[in-house]
Image (spheres, helix red, strand yellow):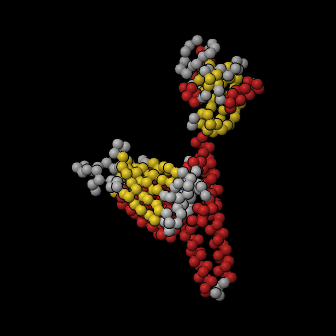
Amino acid sequence: METHAGTRPTEVVPGQVIATVSAFGGCTLLLTKQHKIVYASPLARTLVPRHGDILAEADLISVADEARAHREHIVRPCQVTTLGPFHDIVIEATLISGRWILMTVTDRTAEVQAIRIRRDFVSNIGHELRTPVTSVGLIAQALHSCAADPGAVEHFAQRLDHVAKRLERLADGVMALAQAQDNQPSRVRSRLRMTEVVDDAVFLALETARIRGVKLKTKLRADVFVQGDKEALTTAVENLVSNAVQYSPKGSRVIVSSETDAAEGTVSVHVIDQGIGIAPEDQERIFERFYRTDQARSRRAGGTGLGLAIVKHTAASHGGTVSVDSHPGSGSTFTLTLPMAEPEPGQPEGAP
């Protein structure tokens, strides 16, 4: 038998069959009816569990047996946790030459996640709009009914102004997220002192912190420069600080600190709170748009549910990352890491 890359023969298989199967690429297996692997593509050898040359993944075995029993092409979507980064997959299997089962595994994880995010976006923005839009209608009715009472008119006018501002924040958030998600470089990129970006962001969050009774403290030791969009980066840091304030109890404090990693050429901004913390299962999703760990509390606080998604996309568009370290009941630390700007010719790092 001719030898081909990826072949792990346990019985003689015609070279023409192996050559045909190997042309499929991707995650491909050729099995005997007893689940022995006679061919595995390089990706399949990396991902698919096996005991020696025996297939050891229950869902794949089930589909292989179905294809053998019914002698027809089987296509089966499936969710698995045993194939590394492949979570949502489509398994296809068919009996060939009456002796072997050809099986392919197609990864749909990213596609399924994108569909879920789009679905959640439509659903959540509908929820976000429903309350203020309903309020506008009710306030309009109230204004009609109390037109002769100046005091009541003033009261409902103030409420209408509050609702209008909430809608404006939501619209601004959606637009900011759209801009942050744009793969095109920001229109305005300049050399920015990171301490100034952080100071501006903290200043924007001061009033919210004062109202909520939360103290803001900065410990900025990294006086370095980054290359970026000042408005976008300031908004990203302000979103992290405001998020920390929102989930912090009265009388607690939020600390904003910074540090550099000379070896990696990065600067990191840490936003540390003493809040309720985030459960491990929520930490994987909090950077998705509109995802909230506490729906009711977030809406009472007036958040849009877009802040952390904006931070994530802003970080990515600047070649950086955002991460969270949190434990329920022990507060959270959000970290925005960005590449430092190259020193200007003739000047040491840190010089304007």
Question: In the shown orientation, is residue 250 left or right of residue 56?
Answer: left
Q: In the depicted view, which residue is nearer to us: 166 or 301? A: 301
Compared to residue 22, the image places residue 325 above or below, namely: below
Q: Residue at x 40, y 56 (%)?
A: 257
Q: x, y percentage for residue 22?
A: 58, 23
Q: Residue at x 65, y 64 (%)?
A: 130
Most distant residue in the left direction: 346
Q: Quadrant of the N terminus?
A: top right
Q: Residue at x 63, y 51 (%)?
A: 119
In the picture, residue 19 is in which quadrant?
top right
Q: x, y percentage for residue 229?
A: 40, 56
Q: In the depicted view, which residue is nearer to us: 138 or 329? A: 329
Compared to residue 142, the image places residue 82 above or below, namely: above
Compared to residue 17, the image places residue 271 above or below, namely: below
Question: In the shown orientation, is residue 2 left or right of residue 340?
Answer: right
Most distant residue in the right direction: 70
Q: Quadrant of the C terminus?
A: bottom left
Q: Looking at the image, can residue 285 be seen?
A: no
Looking at the rendered structure, the number of numbered marks drawn on it comes to 0
Q: x, y percentage for residue 216?
A: 44, 64
In the picture, residue 123 is in which quadrant?
bottom right
Question: In the shown orientation, is residue 223 left or right of residue 314?
Answer: left
Q: Looking at the image, can residue 324 be seen?
A: yes
Question: In the shown orientation, is residue 193 left or right of residue 69?
Answer: left
Compared to residue 94, the image places residue 321 above or below, namely: below
Q: x, y percentage for residue 32?
A: 68, 19
